[in-house]
Amino acid sequence: MKIINLPLLNCDSEKEFKDVFETELVNKNLNFEGYRILMIKDDFDHAFYEKSEGGVEKGKFGIRRAKRMMFLKSICEKTIPFVMFWETKRKGKELCVLCEEAETAIYLKARKSKNREFFIFKTIIAFGSKIDSRIKKQKEQGKKITNLEVLFVEAD
């Protein structure tokens, strides 16, 4: 048996979640597997909102996602278990960092500039209903990888 400590946030308001995101994650030197993760303030509005009733894209604050934002630090520090999948079947070909025990997936996009390779933070998914089938789908949509260099061959 292994006990996993998951860093779940308990904030009183959406603003408090956003403040934590900006002070703890934005413009910090987070490195995942040797590559920097770039995050900007605007990422909060994309990553922590989800479809609202009626299908409005990014129409509702996703508190389950927001509570898990510190998982980003945890994967960098390797304090929670994860498996990496390169989403080759998706148009965007993003890296899915699947934290199955935490029922969470973190998506990163590989990028290259003139002299460095890095990741852009895309989103966090906190699985709700139908957890088993959703985790299975994540695994089927990608190719399990251990070496991230392959991502940067196709990065833009």
Image (cartoon, rainbow, N blue to C red):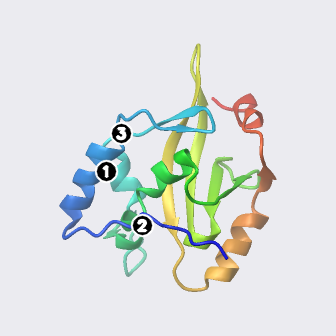
**Mark 1 vs mark 2, CA separation in Å:** 12 Å
| Residue 58 is at least partly visible in this image | no
Question: Dots 3 and 1: beta carbons under 8 Å?
Answer: no
Specify the quadrant that holds the N terminus: bottom right
- Residue at horizontal 35 percent and vertical 34 percent from the top: 27
| Callout 1 amino acid | Phe
- Residue at horizontal 80 percent and vertical 54 percent from the top: 143
Above/below status of 37 relative to 129: above
| Callout 3 amino acid | Ile
The residue carrying mark 3 is 40
Relative to residue 84, is residue 63 drawn left or right?
A: left
- Residue 153 location, x and y as percent? 75, 29
Q: How many marks?
A: 3
Specify the quadrant that holds the C terminus: top right
**Mark 3 vs mark 1, CA separation in Å:** 9 Å
The residue carrying mark 1 is 21
Relative to residue 155, is residue 58 drawn left or right?
A: left
Above/below status of 94 relative to 113: below
> Helix, strand, or loop for circle 1?
helix
Q: Earlier in the sequence, mark 3 or mark 2?
A: 3
Q: Nearer the viewer, residue 71 or 125?
A: 71
- Residue 105 location, x and y as percent? 57, 62
> Helix, strand, or loop for circle 3?
loop
